[in-house]
Image: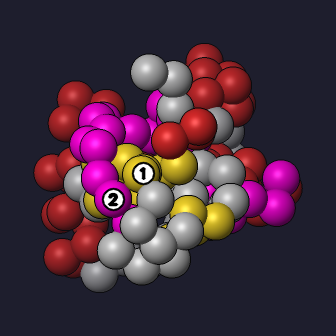
């Protein structure tokens, strides 16, 4: 989940009010970030990722997603015990659930009560 309030605030902050920080990245990582960032620029993408990490950890929810982190949901049936990626609640074997496609392209288990229909 990207913390939209913090990210919105960080995007409005003029770069002249930001501190310069040096970070060493592997060439492949930097190129992949550039590819993912589109018109946003890879440094802005890195700031967004860092804000997301900080926000999740401050809330103690580093493992959980928000509904806004999903591109789509697909109805499914749990083939084993699962944990909802949004609420952290259990999804029992053979229970209805959704597979949520995240913004990063991963499928995660989602409880049926965790998303509006």
- Is residue 79 highlighted in magenta? no
The front one of 100 and 57 is: 100
The front one of 2 and 114 is: 114
Q: Which mark is residue 77?
A: 2
Report whether 51 appears left or right of 28.
right
Residue 40, percent across and down? Answer: 31, 32
Secondary structure at badge 1 equals: strand
What's the residue at 22%, 49% (across, down)? 36
What's the residue at 56%, 63% (across, down)? 91
Q: Is residue 16 placed above or below 65 in the rendered structure?
A: above
Residue 10 occupies which quadrant of the picture? top right
Report whether 30 appears left or right of 95.
left
What residue does disc 1 label?
Answer: 97
Q: What distance separates the C-alpha of mark 1 from that of mark 2?
A: 6 Å
Report whether 54 appears left or right of 81.
right
Q: Is residue 62 placed above or below 110 in the rendered structure?
A: below
Residue 79, percent across and down? Answer: 34, 74
Q: Is residue 27 visible?
A: yes
Magenta residue span: 59-78
Report whether 9 appears left or right of 47.
right
> Along the polypeptide, which appears first: circle 1 or circle 2?
2
- Is residue 67 highlighted in magenta? yes
Question: Contact (CB < 8 A) between labels 1 and 2?
Answer: yes
The front one of 26 and 37 is: 37
What's the residue at 29%, 43% (across, down)? 75
Q: Residue furthest front?
A: 94
């Amino acid at each position: 989940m990207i913390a939209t309030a913090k990210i919105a605030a960080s995007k409005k902050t003029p770069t002249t009010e930001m501190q310069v920080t040096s970070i060493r990245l592997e060439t492949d990582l930097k190129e992949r970030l550039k590819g993912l960032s589109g018109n946003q620029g890879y440094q802005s993408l890195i700031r967004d990722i860092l804000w997301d990490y900080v926000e999740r950890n401050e809330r103690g929810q580093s493992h959980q997603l928000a509904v806004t982190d999903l591109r789509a949901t697909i109805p499914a049936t749990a083939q084993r015990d699962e944990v909802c990626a949004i609420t952290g609640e259990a999804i029992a074997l053979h229970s209805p659930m959704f597979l949520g496609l995240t913004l990063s392209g991963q499928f995660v288990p989602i409880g049926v009560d965790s998303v509006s229909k």
